Image (spheres, rainbow, N blue to C red):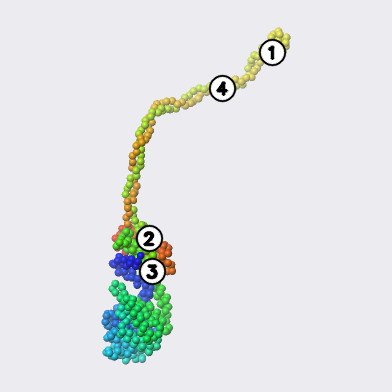
């Protein structure tokens, strides 16, 4: 993963200048955001308890007038950046109590340098036309009336003790464009300025601003050596007059960047009765605003990127790279550059490449539709043949029959029995035994007849039984159908890409700045995902339906509105 991913992502938004602006890291620089809000506050309310006369001087084209226009919020003050159009003093007073004096160029054989010099009470150049009067152009009411007033002032009037009570500079901003170099004439002018100020006030009241110009493509005009040479040249001249280090800041006058740093130096240089509670405004109010505004702009950029990526299929290529991986890498780089210290950015971007690619691949897999076709389900079967067997068939018939049973009966009957005669004579005469009827008890078996029914099995005929038996031969038969996966179709990124992309972006924003991204990236993304799901999970079905059934530009617009409602509003 590299910063190039962020540059590549910008190609997708050539039709959206506002997104390109948001992807410019300078737009989210906290110092620059503070500058923007400070400029607004300076136009709206009183920040300094007493008027502060703030003079801008330096060579023509350095950026004095551009800085004044940035403070005014318009381009009304004349400047071409190439030649001196400031033939007089351009002036405006702000609600903040700051009075801005834009002087004609000083140094490098300027045509109107003597106007500059008389305004700052520096002796005029003898080899240039002596100035006895000049014009002061007042832009203070231009925003309200569209009018610019002017007044011709003589040098004597301007430099009078009475007038100096109102116009004497409290601070002087010496503006230098490093790409134009710090030339001999610049040194000569600066030396005269510092000597005059020291003779008049004693302490230094000059702030040095290195105005960094940019080319059309956004690259810097000055080289690092140009900037270093400018610092060195200013320091050498300054230390001829004062001890210590000169107060030098870098600004971009066209964009109004550096106002915050200049104001901090104002607070350090001016006495307390002049600055009032300005330090508190800088450290508390503006800092809070800058943090909130940075978050808002950052999230707005995430919304535009996520909404557009949601309409692309997840297999879209960007050159020879996966668009999804490039976009995720760009968001990671974007977040790191905004919310992390500069010294850890390069190493973090390098080591997080694999982690970011892993998240992108997971997103891609979630948005794949399986393509299927019907497949026959077959079964191996054995051929059968029928074996027929004749089997007797029986039936049961009920039969009534008579059965004889016997029971024991006790009865007494008269029977003749032989009884031995007791009398021997009788035995001799009549025989030993005599006949005698006696009653005798006996048990007899008496037959009893009864009717019984029984079932009798009888053959009623023959029937055929058929049995399927294997032949040892086999064949395949279709018994059904099932879906067979034959491929996958990549869908539009939809909700899943939005969730993953925002999980990376918000995870980095919300993470503790002290955490090492390289070891905690997975946890950071997981935490970001929880936040995202809480905010947008209820829109999942709607988002997926939009990207699948609506034209991409329409789907993108609706998704942007949805995400703005939950992430920014």
Q: Which residue is mark 3?
A: 345
Crowd band around label 3 with a 10 angstrom C-alpha radius: few (<14), some (14–19), many (20+): some
Q: Which residue is mark 1?
A: 420
Disc 3 versus disc 4: distance between alpha carbons?
Answer: 120 Å
- Observer-side mark, 4 or 1, equals 1
Disc 1 versus disc 3: distance between alpha carbons?
Answer: 149 Å
Disc 2 versus disc 1: distance between alpha carbons?
Answer: 133 Å
> Mark 3 falls on what kind of element?
helix
| Res 243 seen here | yes
N-terminal-most mark, 2 or 4: 2
N-terminal-most mark, 2 or 1: 2
x then y, percent, for residue 191: 34, 86
N-terminal-most mark, 1 or 3: 3
Q: Which residue is mark 2?
A: 358
The C terminus is located in which quarter?
bottom left
The N terminus is located in which quarter?
bottom left
Give above or below for 172 relative to 304: below
Q: Which mark is residue 261?
A: none
- Observer-side mark, 3 or 4, equals 3
Q: Which residue is mark 4?
A: 406
């Amino acid at each position: 993963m590299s910063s190039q991913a962020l540059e590549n992502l910008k190609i997708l938004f050539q039709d959206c200048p506002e997104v390109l602006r948001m992807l410019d890291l300078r737009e989210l620089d906290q110092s620059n955001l503070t500058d923007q809000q400070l400029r607004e506050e300076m136009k709206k309310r009183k920040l300094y308890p007493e008027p502060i006369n703030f003079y801008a001087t330096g060579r023509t084209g350095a950026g004095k007038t551009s800085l004044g226009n940035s403070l005014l919020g318009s381009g009304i003050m004349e400047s071409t950046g190439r030649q001196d159009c400031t033939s007089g003093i351009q002036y405006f007073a702000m609600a903040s109590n700051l009075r801005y004096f834009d002087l004609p160029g000083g140094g490098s054989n300027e045509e109107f340098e003597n106007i500059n010099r008389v305004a700052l009470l520096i002796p005029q150049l003898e080899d240039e036309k002596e100035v006895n009067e000049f014009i002061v152009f007042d832009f203070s009411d231009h925003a309200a009336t569209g009018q610019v007033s002017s007044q011709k002032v003589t040098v004597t009037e301007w430099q009078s003790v009475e007038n100096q009570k109102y116009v004497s500079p409290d601070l002087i901003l010496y503006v230098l464009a490093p790409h134009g170099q710090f030339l001999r004439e610049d040194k000569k002018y600066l030396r005269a300025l510092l000597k005059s100020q020291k003779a008049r006030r004693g302490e230094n009241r000059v702030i040095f601003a290195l105005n960094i110009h940019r080319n059309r493509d956004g690259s810097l005009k000055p080289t690092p050596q140009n900037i270093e040479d400018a610092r060195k040249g200013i320091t050498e001249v300054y230390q001829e007059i004062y001890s210590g280090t000169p107060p030098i800041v870098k600004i971009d006058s066209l964009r109004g960047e550096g106002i915050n740093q200049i104001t901090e130096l104002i607070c350090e240089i001016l006495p307390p009765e002049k600055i009032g509670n300005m330090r508190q405004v800088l450290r508390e109010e503006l800092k809070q605003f800058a943090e909130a505004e940075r978050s808002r702009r950052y999230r707005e950029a995430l919304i535009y990127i996520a909404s557009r990526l949601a309409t692309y299929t997840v297999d879209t290529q960007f050159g020879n790279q996966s668009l999804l991986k490039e976009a995720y890498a760009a968001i990671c780089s974007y977040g790191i550059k905004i919310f992390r210290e500069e010294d850890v950015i390069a190493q973090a971007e390098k080591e997080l490449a694999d982690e970011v690619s892993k998240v992108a691949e997971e997103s891609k897999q979630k948005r794949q539709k399986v393509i299927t076709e019907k497949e026959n389900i077959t079964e191996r079967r054995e051929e059968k043949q029928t074996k027929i067997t004749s089997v007797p068939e029986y039936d049961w018939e009920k039969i009534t029959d008579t059965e004889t049973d016997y029971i024991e009966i006790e009865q007494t009957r008269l029977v003749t029995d032989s009884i031995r005669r007791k009398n021997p004579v009788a035995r001799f005469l009549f025989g030993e035994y005599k006949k005698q009827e006696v009653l005798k008890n006996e048990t007899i078996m008496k037959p009893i007849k009864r009717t019984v029914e029984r079932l009798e099995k009888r053959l009623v005929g023959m029937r055929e039984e058929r049995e399927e038996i294997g032949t040892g031969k086999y064949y395949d038969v279709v018994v059904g159908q099932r879906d067979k996966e034959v491929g996958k179709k990549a869908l539009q990124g939809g909700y899943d890409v939005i969730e993953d992309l925002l999980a990376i972006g918000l995870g980095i924003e919300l993470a503790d700045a002290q955490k090492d991204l390289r070891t905690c990236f997975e946890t950071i993304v997981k935490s970001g995902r929880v936040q995202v799901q809480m905010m947008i999970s209820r829109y999942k079905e709607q988002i997926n339906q939009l990207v699948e059934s609506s034209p991409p530009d329409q789907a993108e617009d609706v998704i942007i509105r949805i995400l703005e409602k939950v992430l920014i509003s």
